[in-house]
Amino acid sequence: MYPERIKRIQAFLKTENLDGLVVTRAASLRYLSGFSSPDAVLVVQTGRADFLTDFRYIDQSKEEVRGAKITITVGDCIGGLKNQKQLQGRHLRYGYEPEYLTCDNLTRIQNELPGALLIPINNAVEQFAVTKDKIEIGYIRKAAQIADTAFERILNYIRPGIRENEIRAELEYQMMTLGSERPAFDTIVASGYRSGMPHGVASEKKIAKGDFVTMDFGATYNGYCCDITRTVVMGKASPRQKRIYNLVLKAQKAAIDKVKAGVSGKAIDLAARNIIDRAGFKKNFGHGTGHGIGLFIHSKPSVSTRSQDIMKRGMVITVEPGIYISGWGGVRIEDDVVVTTTGGSILNRAPKFLLEL
């Protein structure tokens, strides 16, 4: 698997007239080499691949890394580049991932490779990870199963007076006990008026009767992420809450029904957005309907009004419309969906009808 992925990068280097690609992003390292820790540098050249890490990861790198020559550096990995003669030379053209490399590390890499020209290449690795094979989809499905089970368990935990941070901690604990490597991202728990914040990271706010409780969370399995959102009500839902919830659910279903290979991300977005807009909530849905997931938690394809991406078989996307009313609350419902030639296959199984706890 990993040697084949490196070969794809090597072919890409030739088409882009590059001598190599310097990889530092954790997800890219894992995609290309299998290494599951972030402290490493992978340099892929047209005829070889060199993996640099430090003393802490001697055994781990031997167990995990495939398709690249491992070098254990003295000190940090970037600093070890200067001792690799095969990487040095005048007028060499090295690509790098600009979206995920700090200015400081870029400067340090340039200092360690003084004869090289460093060229930013957007989505250099991510472009190859957009479509998934059956094994990768299986990993995402397993992550989704973990998240689904954690959600089922958390329903018995939520009660008036408990804090959002406690719900977050319990959700993450349950996912870990079920086999998740780590949370896929910072877990969102937003209740009451805070559910009107699309990214209301968990706070000390206590859950009260009548609150919407929105939970956006994800598990990680073999490095592959899932991303699920469910909104529940603490107690009996009001007519307004029911209306908003069912409207979002209708919009999500319309978008999922649109998912199919050959369809644009924009068309999927509009399927959800048109329903919300026509109901009078255009200003209350201000983000895209979804994004790609996998090793990279937010990646291509984009599912938004500006998206020019076309769905391909094997892509895995989120579908997550929402309505957010400042000072009152909001609803988001999200599933992970595999793109096929006949439609979209939902990976999540957690219930989506309005749960009144």
Image (cartoon, rainbow, N blue to C red):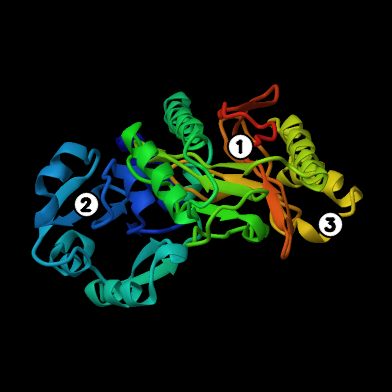
Query: In the image, what residue type sits under mark 3?
Result: Lys
Seen in the image, is 315 located left or right of residue 58?
A: right
> For the residues carrying marks 3 and 2, which lies nearer the camera in this image?
3
Which residue appears farthest toward the top when viewing the image? 342
Query: In the image, what residue type sits under mark 2?
Result: Phe
- Of residue 155 and residue 52, the one placed in the foreground of this image is 155
Q: Quadrant of the C terminus?
A: top right
Residue 255, compared with residue 341, is above or below; it is below
- Of residue 66 and residue 143, the one placed in the foreground of this image is 143
What residue is pinned by disc 3?
A: 282
What residue is pinned by disc 1?
A: 357
| Residue 144 x %, y % | 49, 32
- Of residue 328 and residue 351, the one placed in the foreground of this image is 328
- Of residue 110 and residue 289, the one placed in the foreground of this image is 289
Q: Is residue 302 visible?
A: no
Measure the alpha-carbon separation of dots 3 and 2. 49 Å
Disc on the earlier residue, 3 or 1: 3
> For the residues carrying marks 3 and 1, which lies nearer the camera in this image?
1
Residue that appears at 27% across and 47% down? 47
| Residue 207 x %, y % | 56, 53
Measure the alpha-carbon separation of dots 1 and 2. 51 Å
What residue is pinned by disc 2?
A: 51
Q: Are marks 3 and 2 in contact (CB under 8 Å)?
A: no
Seen in the image, is 239 located left or right of residue 181?
A: right
Query: In the image, what residue type sits under mark 1?
Result: Leu
Q: Quadrant of the N terminus?
A: top left
